[in-house]
Amino acid sequence: MTLIESTPAGVDLCKPAPRAHPRPEGQDRYTISEVVAFTGLTAHTLRWYERIGLMPHIDRSHTGQRRFTNRDLDWLVFVGKLRLTGMPVADMVRYAELVREGEHTFEARQELLQQTRRDVRRRIAELHDTLAVLDHKIDFYADARRASERL
């Protein structure tokens, strides 16, 4: 049986399995060092994200320490995906602002993501072309090496 035959209809094979959160909802108060360990981001980056408005309001403990939630971790995963697309930071901040403004911004958010998707598809096409050039060169050198070994 092939993978396609064994996969239920409507299941996205490319979508990664959701990451389990370290703590259940309601007990999900993480320090910045725990978020650093979980996400691989630096504390400087997390503070910068908050300062530029990319992170929603982060709760603070009674001593002023940041306390992140599972929802914050999910947002950071999404921001990481946006970074991988090459989306400019200003657009990511704009998207975060639109999210905070509420449901009436769905259309604007959708357009921002659609533009990013178009940009990603264009880059993928460029990478496919680049891969074809690399494959051609690799084949050329392999053929040349074999020809020189026959001499």
Image (cartoon, rainbow, N blue to C red):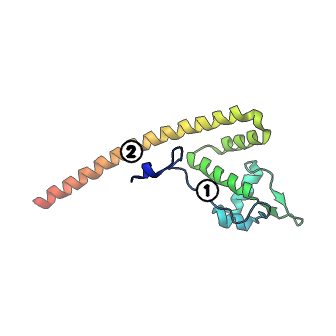
Label 2 vs 1, first from the N-terminus: 1
x%, y% of residue 72?
73, 55
x%, y% of residue 115?
59, 35
Check disc 2 and report the residue beneath it: 130
Picture residue at 64% right of the left edge, 54% below the top: 77
Helix, strand or loop at disc 1?
loop
Q: Is residue 48 left or right of residue 113?
A: right
> Is residue 71 or residue 139 the one in the foreground?
71
x%, y% of residue 145?
20, 57
Q: Is residue 32 left or right of residue 11?
A: right
> Is residue 100 or residue 3 the one in the foreground?
3
Label 1, residues with CA under 10 Å away: few <14, some 14-19, many ≥20: few
Name the outermost residue toward the left.
Answer: 151
The amino acid sitting under disc 1 is: Pro
Name the outermost residue toward the right.
Answer: 62
Q: Quadrant of the C terminus?
A: bottom left
- The picture quadrant where one finds residue 101 is top right
- The picture quadrant where one finds residue 38 is bottom right
| Above or below, comparing residue 9 to residue 111 in the picture | below
Query: Could you say which disc has been placed on residue 58 in the image?
Result: none
Picture residue at 62% right of the left edge, 59% below the top: 19
Check disc 1 and report the residue beneath it: 18
Helix, strand or loop at disc 2?
helix
Report the Cα–Cα distance between label 2 and label 1: 32 Å
